[in-house]
Image (cartoon, rainbow, N blue to C red):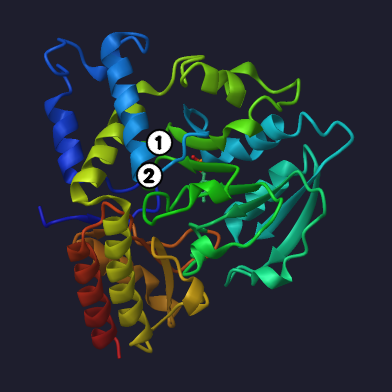
């Protein structure tokens, strides 16, 4: 089989070393005689797996002590409901949530939030992050929600990601598709959430990082299994957590630490993104539509100027082992997702193919 590079937006590529280790431990984890899948979540074996995963994630992201890390189920989208259900309990007379709208994922969050609160779209653009000076924030808003990397459209809050200057605003950030790809100042956020299947592990685990003073503000109708305070008080074991997914996420965290942590991932992400965008910019055969300063380093949507060649492009890519490059159906074109686990060799192979295909169809 040709060497495969998987550019899927999610569920996405995982480090080969992690998959090999999981395979080796599949039938018998560390002499326990059990697969991790078969273990009680309350037994000492799984508790040790859980605690290591929590500790490693805390270390990788430098999560301060006054934040809880929750390993939940339900995926990224469920958080669009769970966050209002968990944060609006102390706003009985109606709350307003501010949103920065930068694409499909913030759009979905906005739609869901309207079920629970008034929504104010403080700024909107799907090709750039609107400058902070233009945000029309609501005084006294319950919180401000943003999607810091739009997986479909490819808008990322960067390069000044850590320069948000907001006072007295609780920031909620959907970091599903770029968490662990760059250093973040967790203390700037009230809640950070991320589905695992982009940059962490298998689908089914959702990470929530929440400042402790925001716990205990759930609406009475919030389902108990999704009440952040109950989940936090029970170390994510109020009900059965997604145990196998947490185990794989833990292996990914260990892998990240061996690579040099988030700083090294950020360096690699920049190198991969620079290579790919330079190839796209350097050719008049392709185009990109996001403002250069807000281009995602994880999800790179691009278009063939002659879209009648899309099928041939994808077929040629597949023949070279470059898989899952088709763009999201809502925007068309192509998309290369180049998460942490994508080696630079994959991007080099894609760039070689971009040049070759353009050269053949001049
Ligand atoms: C994938 C994704 C989600 C949705 O995750 P699900 O697990 O499918 O619910 C939410 N937000 C962003 C930014 C994503 O990339």
Crowd tier of the residue under label 2, counting other residues whose Cα lies within 10 Å: few below 14, some 14–19, many 20 or above: some
Residue ID at (46%, 77%):
288
Crowd tier of the residue under label 1, counting other residues whose Cα lies within 10 Å: few below 14, some 14–19, many 20 or above: some
The answer to whether the beta carbon of the residue marked 1 is less than 8 Å from any atom of ligand 1 is yes
What x and y, as percent, mark residue 9?
A: 40, 53
Determine whether the residue tagged by mark 2 lies in a helix, strand or loop: loop
Quadrant, the C terminus = bottom left
Q: Going from the N terminus, do you reach mark 1 or mark 2 first?
A: 2
What x and y, as percent, mark residue 214?
A: 65, 33
What x and y, as percent, mark residue 326?
A: 39, 61
What x and y, as percent, mark residue 199?
A: 36, 47
CA–CA distance in space, label 1 to label 2: 6 Å
Label pair 1/2, CB-CB below 8 angstroms: yes
Q: Is residue 61 left or right of residue 15?
A: right
Determine whether the residue tagged by mark 1 lies in a helix, strand or loop: loop
Q: Is residue 47 left or right of residue 329?
A: left
Q: Is residue 91 left or right of residue 272?
A: right
Q: Is residue 264 visible?
A: yes
Q: Is residue 153 visible?
A: no
Q: Is residue 250 above or below residue 194?
A: above
The total number of labels drawn is 2
Q: Is residue 331 above or below residue 240?
A: below
Q: What residue is shown with label 1?
A: 203
Residue 315 lies in what quarter of the image? bottom left
Residue ID at (52%, 58%):
150
Residue 191 lies in what quarter of the image? top right
Q: What residue is shown with label 2?
A: 11
């Amino acid at each position: 089989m040709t060497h495969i590079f998987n550019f899927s937006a999610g569920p996405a590529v995982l480090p080969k070393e992690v998959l090999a280790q999981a395979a080796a431990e599949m039938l018998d984890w560390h002499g326990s005689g059990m697969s991790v899948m078969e273990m009680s979540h309350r037994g000492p074996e799984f508790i040790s797996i859980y605690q290591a995963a929590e500790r490693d994630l805390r270390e990788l992201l430098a999560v301060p002590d006054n934040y809880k890390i929750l390993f939940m189920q339900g995926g990224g989208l469920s958080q669009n409901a769970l966050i209002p259900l968990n944060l609006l309990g102390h706003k009985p007379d109606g709350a307003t949530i501010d949103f920065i709208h930068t694409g499909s994922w913030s759009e979905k969050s906005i739609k869901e939030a309207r079920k629970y609160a008034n929504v104010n779209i403080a700024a909107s653009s799907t090709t750039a992050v609107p400058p902070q000076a233009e945000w029309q924030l609501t005084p006294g808003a319950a919180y401000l929600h943003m999607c810091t990397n739009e997986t479909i459209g490819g808008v990322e809050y960067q390069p000044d990601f850590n320069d948000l200057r907001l006072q007295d605003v609780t920031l909620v950030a959907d970091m599903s598709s770029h968490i662990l790809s760059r250093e973040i100042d967790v203390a700037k956020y009230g809640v950070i959430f991320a589905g695992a299947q982009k940059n962490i592990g298998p689908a089914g685990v959702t990470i929530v990082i929440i400042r402790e003073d925001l716990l205990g503000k759930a609406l009475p109708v919030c389902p108990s299994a999704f009440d952040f305070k109950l989940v936090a008080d029970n170390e994510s074991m109020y009900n059965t957590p997604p145990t196998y997914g947490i185990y794989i996420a833990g292996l990914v965290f260990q892998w990240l630490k061996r690579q040099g942590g988030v700083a090294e991932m950020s360096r690699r992400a920049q190198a991969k993104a620079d290579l790919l965008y330079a190839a796209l910019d350097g050719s008049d055969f392709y185009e990109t539509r996001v403002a250069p300063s807000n281009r995602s380093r994880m999800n790179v949507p691009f278009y063939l100027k002659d879209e009648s060649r899309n099928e041939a492009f994808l077929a040629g890519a597949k023949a070279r082992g470059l898989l899952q490059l088709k763009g999201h159906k809502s925007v068309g074109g192509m998309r290369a997702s180049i998460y942490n686990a994508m080696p630079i060799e994959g991007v080099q192979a894609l760039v070689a193919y971009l040049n070759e295909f353009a050269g053949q169809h001049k």
